Amino acid sequence: MCGRFTQQLSWAELHELYSVYTVPHVSSLPARFNGAPTQEFAACRLNESGNREISILRWGLIPFWSKDPSIGSRLINARAETVHSKPSFRAAFRQRRCLVPANGWFEWSSVAGRKQPYFIASESSGPLSIAALWESWDKDEEPLETFTLITTQATSELSKIHHRQPAILSSNDWDLWLDPNSSATSLLDLVQTPYRGPYLYHAVSTRVNNVRNNTKEILEPSSERGLFGSIDQD
């Protein structure tokens, strides 16, 4: 699963990344060095006119039909293999797809009998776009817009850290993913094909285990254990 990721992008960077020029009613974006479920993140989706827009969504999908919003804490990821058929995700998969930009993500691996966190990012240091679904839940006075990240089987190299990875899409696939008329078959092909990088990864301090540690220092290579690599499987 993907339970933590980083997002440190300005409005200008988001606009350049997705060619979007509409601005939400938010003055600034918080830096998420240790982004966690229930927090808010920027996402790219299509508006009613069919144009890309940047929206602020909360991590943890609440299906429109749910009576209890607490379900969102359990729906932070959707598996690419079943996203089209699971009751919690299938409506959003058909109609409400989005992209969530990330500067990288964290995964935990068992090393010498303990859980060792790793930070994984693009070799270029540029943002990655994760395929995601969004929902609007209107059982309260104000609608609550939420999202879930899609995960897929990890590449053979990344599987040494964890058997799953986010379903990352290249820029050539963004239009297909966001297009409401795309076929389910073509969409499933996208998210079930793991993005092969190239990536950089390294072990980080277990300080990342605490969501209150939200500083750039947690992204630095750990002094406790050294593992650093460049992954390119193209």
Image (cartoon, rainbow, N blue to C red):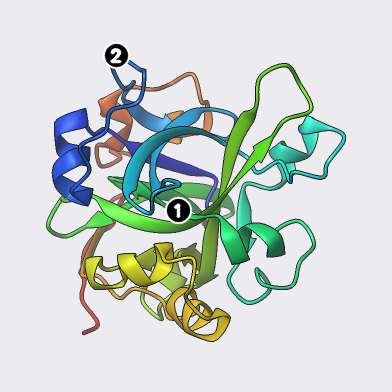
Assess disc 2: are there few (<14), some (14-19) or many (≥20) residues with their C-alpha within 10 Å of its C-alpha.
few
Q: Decide if residue 209 is on the left or right side of residue 73.
A: left
Q: Decide if residue 153 is on the left or right side of residue 205.
A: right
Image point 71% across, 41% down: which residue? 62
User: Residue 163's spot in the image, x, y percent?
Assistant: 53, 70
* Callout 2 touching callout 1 (CB < 8 Å): no
Image point 34% across, 42% down: which residue? 53
Kindly indicate the quadrant of the structure image that contains residue 207.
top left
Assess disc 1: are there few (<14), some (14-19) or many (≥20) residues with their C-alpha within 10 Å of its C-alpha.
many
Residue 98, disc:
1
Q: How many labels does the image show?
A: 2
User: Residue 95's spot in the image, x, y percent?
Assistant: 58, 60
Position above or below: 18 against 60: below
Image point 59% across, 38% down: which residue? 146
Q: Residue furthest right?
A: 67
Q: How far apart are marks 2 and 1 (CA)?
A: 22 Å
Question: What residue does disc 2 label?
Answer: 27
Kindly indicate the quadrant of the structure image that contains residue 145.
top right
Of mark 2 and mark 1, the one earlier in the sequence is: 2
**In the rendered structure, which amino acid carries the disc numbered 2?**
Ser
What kind of element bears circle 2? loop
**In the rendered structure, which amino acid carries the disc numbered 1?**
Cys
User: Residue 14's spot in the image, x, y percent?
Assistant: 22, 39
Quadrant, the N terminus: bottom right
Q: Nearer the viewer, residue 8 or 176?
A: 176
Q: Decide if residue 181 is on the left or right side of residue 92.
A: left
Position above or below: 198 against 2: below
Residue 162 at least partly seen: no
Image point 63% across, 77% down: which residue? 81
What kind of element bears circle 1? strand
